[in-house]
Structure formats: structure tokens, C-alpha cells
Amino acid sequence: MKVTLAKYAGFCFGVSRSLKLVENALKDGVRIRTLGPIIHNRSVVERLERMGACPGLNVGDVLPGETAVICSHGAPESVYLELRSRGIPFIDATCPDVRRIHDIVRECSKEGRIIIIIGEREHTEVKAIAGHTRECMVFENDSELEKWIRSEVFERDLPFAAVCQTTLNVDTWQKCDKILKKECTNCKIFDTICNATLNRQREAARIASASDAVVVVGDSQSSNTRRLFEICSAHCPIAFHIEKADELDKLNNIKSLAVTAGASTPPWIIKEVMSRMSEEKITMETESFAELLEASLKTLNTGDKVTGVVTGMSPTEIHVDLGTKHAGYIPVSEISDDPNVKPEDFFKIDQEVECYVMRVNDVEGTAMLSKKRLDSVKGWEEVEQACEDKTTVEGFVVEENKGGIVVSVKGVRVFVPASQTGIPKEGLLSQLMKKKVKLKITEVNRARRRVVGSIRIVANEERRAASEKVWADIQEGMKYRGVVKSLTSYGAFIDIGGVDGMIHVSELSWKRLHHPSEVLKIGEEIDVYVISLDREKKKISLGHRLAEENPWSKFMAGYNIGDVVSAKVVKLMPFGAFAEIIDGVDGLIHISQIADHRIAKPGDVLSEGQTVDVKITNVDNEKQKVWLSIRELLENNPSTFPEAGEDSGESLPSDGVVAVSEGSGVEIKTESLAKEVELPVSSPEAGVDEGTEAKE
Ligand code: F3S
């Protein structure tokens, strides 16, 4: 007959821990009074009694000089209060998983929630949990829960919080969970089945279904053993529940047998059962209780490298079964240095995981683990290799200090001096914090645990590669989306993806600008096109203003000679007045064309900001100049000009005009007038180098 013993058979870490606490206290000569059976197994309790632990039921049973022990199932808050108020010393052997439930229900009660407990109403654990709530209800299974929900007293919008007994059947919990999610609109649900139970139940179901018969060993008082038997019976037609080896009948015609045991079943009983089924008898007499107990426990030390199995995940930690008495957990911060890490990206339930033991808490029965520390050991080798091969690595910036920043690369701390961060002197290194960066490892000194890196080298390499690509592709007329890198009085430098090009101030806008900062900000993204380029000198001249927005083109498309338009006087000069026809196009009203009589100066009739009707008398498309006249309108309709004087003055030659368009200055058409007028020489950008340089 093939006999399979479940890996998760016998004492769980909670039970082992409570026994260990009692045993140690007895060894130290402490007089013990247990408040209820320390675990649900008669044989273990009897042994403890023989060792000196006296059984009691409540605080009243504790005699002077005795130390009370709260069992692994926990106790209501009132018990703690009574022990404290009476000054009775006590050992709290509550399983850490059960204590966690107490914390949950206490917090939720404070929030004003009604606690729903799914579990055996009369079980010590359930009673203890209830004793930490303000208001609670207990349901033994999904049918009871469903019945309550269908009753008239149920109010779906009340604030609830649901927890379950640590040893509840997983199926029962899943059904309850579904009902609560569907029916309660304001319920916080906590799956509090302990990992040990979960593993035990899963494994029992698996080995039971693969065997002809299954034996469940455990005390009939033990709730988790009863659950285990229920599960095994559901998966295997022949299932036995025995407390001791001698209850086992002859198993005829059975080829494969599975053996599992409840969390409170001691190792020696399991051993007896196994030896009874085996040809090879195993003798128990030579081993003491303490030795057997010790054998069932594996110890953990800080710094140990351990392998465990992921049994659960929450947004803050990963539960790991280490096969020891400790509940292992990896805080999210110990998975990796990536602040955005999600546990599900790294782990799956039932996955094996290697980690380092960071801290062992024997009182709490917990072990804090770290995956990133273990990764860092492997990381050293990878970092050394990266330094040798000059390969690029990635890491997260975890610290900023005086001289630079620290980047965690595969768990190894790499110092990047400020000058190698790529942040300019006046910039803040803090902007890199928690960011993912690429860097080269430039120095590794394992003995001094010193690693130095450079982000700048990678950035320069990337820029060089990008620059080569830009130069390979670039053509005149090509469009780019660029970033404004710097501004000067004559233009702006734009990064078009690894190469800087320059936009001359005159190419930025159709309007006259005094400085590029009037339209651009450093860091801004803008669309640019290539006007010209010099591959040898590595210079690129860019344009930003678009041809279709050219005001001259708009003017030419919408206006003709002879049109009468409303224009705004924008500048008065001794020789005439400039008037804006449309945004960006000004025409000149020569002094001779301002009135139908001779005037001394344009200001006698016109003022800046005034809007006047003018006639377009001439247009030079090539030179982009416009000539305007008020006088021609007055001659056609003299009464429309309020300032008309008596003296009509001498008439000026029709070509004796000055034509102006924005940004192009003015031009004298006749020599006689050239003597009379003082001309504006040029637009602001005149005299500035045409600025077609491109800077890499
Ligand atoms: Fe604790 Fe779970 Fe055992 S709750 S006592 S570890 S069965």
C-alpha cells in the first residue's frame, strides 16, 4: 500500500508557538495556569499537565503566584482587562493570525461598523473575536447568512465589517464573501482564514482525491480537524477520522492511502499512525516530548536565506509560508526599490520565493522577509559585470545627498555624483527622486561596498545616437516637434531630438518681436520646420511662423487697389502716418495724402490710435508695401473730412509716396521727398546676424 503523508500535517506555527511559550515558562520554573485548554488535543494537554501546567477555565481560577496563559485561540478583551486589573501576570499565547483579527474588528468597531463573524458560534476563537467588538453577529455558514439577509431585520446600507474564523472551510467563506459583496452596500470584507489552514485544506483535498482512502488524525474537539475531515470526505469515498493510531482498523484492498492531521495534532501521534501502517515499526519511547516538539519546529535566524511559498497577498505585504512556526511576510517596500511596485507583478499564489530573513519576532511569531536584499546579492555580480562590459543598467533613485544621488540597481546602492546626474548646477537633484534612470557603472569596489555610476554618460550616448539619426534623415522643409532649450536676443535654440537648431527671432512670428521670450518659454514644445542646414558646420536654421499665417498673404487675398478700408493709425512720422489695415500689415498715408489741403505735420490732423477710412492707392507685392490715401476720399466727398482747411495746398505727385509694410522699413519713391522726410532705418532685427546657426 502506498501511503502519502501530507506536508502540512500536524502542528501549525500558532500551536507550536503557544506550546513553546508554555514549555519555556515551565522550564524557567513559572507556575502556569492555562485559561482553557492550551490546544484542542487531550494528549498534548495531559502531557503539559504532567509537566506542571495546571488547567483552568477563567481568570478566577488563577491562584496567587501563578501565571495565566491565554491559549492560541485568544481571549475576549474583558479577560485582558480583568488580568490587568487584578495584577495577574500572564503569557499571551494567542496565535498572531488570531490577534490580527482582534485588531481588525476593534478598528472597524471604532469606525461604527457592525461586525459579522463567520465561524462556529461556540468556538473559543469566535467567542474571543466577538469579545473585541462593540456589536457583532455570528453566522456559522452561508445558509445562515443568506437567511438573515432575506429577513426583515436586514438593512443593506448599514456599515458592516466581515471576518471569519481562521480555520473556516474555504468554500464556505467564498460563498459568504459572494453574498456579502452582492447584498451589503457598505461592508468591509476581510478574508482571515489563516495561511496554515488554507494550505492544509488545499493539500488535503488534493491528496484525498488522488487516493483510495484517507485518514484524518486529530482530536474530535478540534474544529480544524473536523473541517479537514469534511473536505477529505468530499474528495474521497473512504475517509476515517481517528484520534490515535490504535483506532485505525485493518485497511483491506486499499492500494493508496493519504494521511493528514489537524493543526493541534502532535507529531508523535502522526508518527504512531504512520508506523502502524508501515512494515517498518518506528519506536517512540526514546524521544522526549520536548525533542519531538522541537523536531516539529524549524528555527529562523536573521540573515538566513530561506525558501517559502506565497500563500496570500495584500496591497501592503506578501504572506509566505516558510514551513516553520513563524508567519513570514514580505512588506511591499522589501520587494523592490520601485515605489510603484505591485505585489501581483512579482508573485503568484503557490509560487516558491527565495528571500532573506530580516527580523524574527518570536513573541509575535512573525518573520519579516526581504526579496530585494537577496536580489542585491545577485545584483553585485550583475553590477560588476555591467561595469566590466560598460553596459547600461536601470535603477530607481532612492536617496539624495550632499554630493549626488543614490540609485538602487538590482538592490545595489550606486552613488551618482551630482556632476554625473545630468542635472545642471543650478537644478534640483530632488527632481530625480523615485524616478527610474539609466546609468553606466563606472567603478565597483566590493570590499568597500562602493559603486559609482553616471547617468550623464548614458544621456550623452543617447543624445549622440539621436543626433546621428537626425542628421541622417534631416532635409530642408522637414517638420519636427522640438523643445525650447534656450533663448537669446536674436533667436531661440530648439532641441529637435538630439540636435539643436536655431530659429531667428524674425522667423518666430509674423509680428515684430523685441525678444523671443515674448512668444516662447524654455521647456515649451513647439512645431518647427527646417529652413536650411549646413551638414559640415552642423548648423540647422529653423522656422516657426507658418506661411499660411503670413499677414501679407492674407492682405493680398482680401484687398485690392481702390478698396476703402478702416485702418488704425499706429505711428505718426514727419513724412506721414502708418495705419494698420489688418494685423501685421500697415500702409503709409503720406503727409500729402492726409488732407485735401497742405498741413504742417501729420499730427495736425491725425492722432495715434485713431481709426480712419482710407483708400488703398497702390500695392507693391514684391516689396510688400501699401500706399493709402485719405485725401482721395475727401476729394470725392469733401464733407466727410472734418479738419479740411481753406487752403487746398499744392498737390503732390501721385508717386511721391513712401510705402511701408511691417518689418520692412520704408522706401522713398521720389528724390524730392527723400530730402523732406526722415526715415526709420530698419526693423529691430535689422543688423542682426541672419542667425542660421545650428548648435549640437
Ligand atoms: Fe494560528 Fe492558523 Fe494555527 S490561526 S493557531 S496558525 S491554524
Image (cartoon, rainbow, N blue to C red):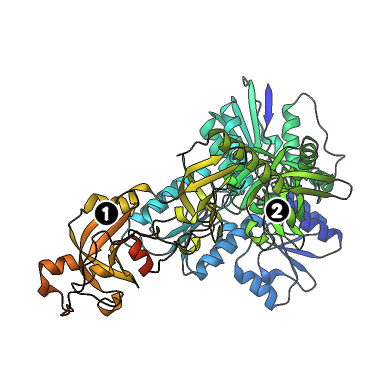
**Picture quarter containing residue 3?**
top right
Please state if 595 lies on the left or on the right of 508 as rendered.
left
Q: Disc 1 versus disc 2: distance between alpha carbons?
A: 58 Å
Percent of width and height locating residue 674:
37, 64
Of the 4 image quadrants, the one containing the N terminus is: top right
Residue bearing mark 2: 421
Residue 366 against residue 513 in the figure, above or below? above
Q: Secondary structure at mark 1?
A: strand
Say which amino acid is labelled 2: Thr
Q: Amino acid at mark 1?
A: Val
In the image shown, does 146 or 41 lie closer to the viewer? 146
Return the x and y of residue 671 as percentages of the image width and height: 35, 61
Asked whether the viewer can see residue 45, the reply is no
Which of the two residues, 267 or 404, is positioned nearer the viewer here? 404
Q: Secondary structure at mark 2?
A: loop
Quadrant in which residue 269 is drawn: top right
